Image (cartoon, rainbow, N blue to C red):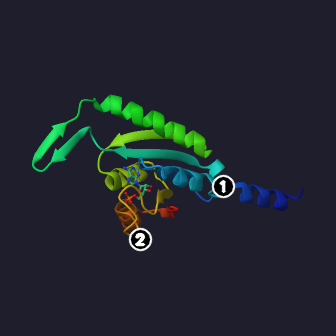
C-alpha cells in the first residue's frame, strides 16, 4: 500500500467527532436516540458519554414542595442501572454513563462545555410530548450549544 493510500485509509476510519454527548430522558424512546448515536459514522473512534438529567426526589404542589421518600443517591443509582441496561440494549459503546440532577438543558450544555464536546445527540422530542416540532430541551440545546447537534427524529 502506498503512503497516500495508507493515509487515506486512516482518514476514512477517523471520526468526524472526538467527544460525543448523548442526552436521553427517561422515556421508552430514549433507545431510539441511543441507536442513532450508535450509527453515527466513525463513532467507534470517539469518546462517548451518555447522560440523563433527573429531577431531584421532590414534587411541587402549587406553592408546596414535598420531599419523596427516597434519597438522591438511591434514586441516582436506580436510574443509572436502568440507563446502563438501555445503553447496553442499544449496542452503543459508551465510555461513560451518568445520571445527574438539575435542569436538563442547562446541565447538558454545562457538561458539553466542560467536556469540550463536539457533538450533542438528543431526541427531537421526549416525555414533554410531540405537540412541538422540537421538544423544549432539544430546542434549548439547538439554540445554545456551541457545537454540532444531532436531533434524532423520534418515531411515533
Ligand atoms: P423534550 O424537550 O423533553 O421533548 O426532550 C427532547 C430530547 O431532549 C429527549 O429526546 C432527550 O434526548 C433530551 N432530554 C430531555 N429531557 C432530558 C433529560 N432529563 N436528561 C437528558 N436528556 C433529556
The residue tagged 1 is 42
Name above or below for residue 19 compared with residue 94.
below
Tags 2 and 1 in contact by the CB under 8 Å rule?
no
Q: Is residue 46 left or right of residue 76?
A: right
Q: Residues within 10 Å of mark 2 (few under 14, many from 20)?
A: few
Q: Residue at x 36, y 41 (%)?
A: 100
What is the x, y in percent for residue 73? 33, 29
- How many C-alpha atoms fall within 10 Å of the one at disc 1: few (<14), some, or many (≥20)? some
Residue 44 lies, in percent from the top left, at 65, 48
* Residue 149 x %, y %: 48, 63
Question: In front here: 66 or 137?
Answer: 66
Single out the residue that lies furthest toward the bottom.
Answer: 133
Camera-side residue of 111 and 114: 111
Question: Nearer the observer, disc 2 or disc 1?
Answer: 2
Image disc number at residue 133: 2
Horizontal side of 126 relative to 45 (left or right) equals left
- As helix, strand or loop, the secondary structure at mark 2 comes to loop
Q: Compare residues 147 and 75 and report the one nearer the observer.
A: 75
User: Can you say which quadrant of the picture contains the N terminus?
Assistant: bottom right
Q: Residue at x 68, y 55 (%)?
A: 14
Residue lying at the far front of the rendered structure: 156
Q: Position of residue 111 (x, y in %)?
A: 40, 49
Q: Looking at the image, is mark 2 or mark 1 earlier in the sequence? A: 1
Element carrying mark 1: loop
Does residue 44 appear to the left or right of 26 in the view shown?
right
- Which quadrant of the render holds ligand 1? bottom left
> In the rendered image of this protein, does residue 65 appear above or below residue 23?
above
Is 136 located above or below residue 20 in the figure? below
Q: Nearer the viewer, residue 40 or 54?
A: 54
Amino acid at each position: 500500500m502506498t503512503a497516500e493510500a495508507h493515509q487515506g485509509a486512516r482518514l476514512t476510519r477517523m471520526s468526524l467527532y472526538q467527544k460525543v454527548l448523548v442526552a436521553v430522558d427517561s422515556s421508552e424512546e430514549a433507545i431510539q436516540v441511543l441507536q442513532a448515536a450508535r450509527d453515527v459514522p466513525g463513532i467507534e473512534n470517539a469518546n462517548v458519554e451518555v447522560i440523563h438529567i433527573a429531577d431531584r426526589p421532590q414534587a411541587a404542589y402549587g406553592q408546596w414542595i414535598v420531599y419523596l421518600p427516597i434519597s438522591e443517591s438511591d434514586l441516582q443509582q436506580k436510574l443509572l442501572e436502568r440507563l446502563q441496561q438501555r445503553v447496553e440494549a442499544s449496542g452503543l459503546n459508551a465510555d461513560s454513563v451518568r445520571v445527574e440532577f438539575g435542569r436538563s438543558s442547562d446541565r447538558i450544555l454545562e457538561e458539553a462545555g466542560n467536556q469540550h464536546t463536539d457533538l450533542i445527540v438528543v431526541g427531537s422530542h421526549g416525555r414533554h410530548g410531540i405537540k412541538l416540532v422540537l421538544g423544549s430541551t432539544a430546542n434549548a440545546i439547538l439554540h445554545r450549544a456551541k457545537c454540532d447537534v444531532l436531533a434524532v427524529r423520534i418515531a411515533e
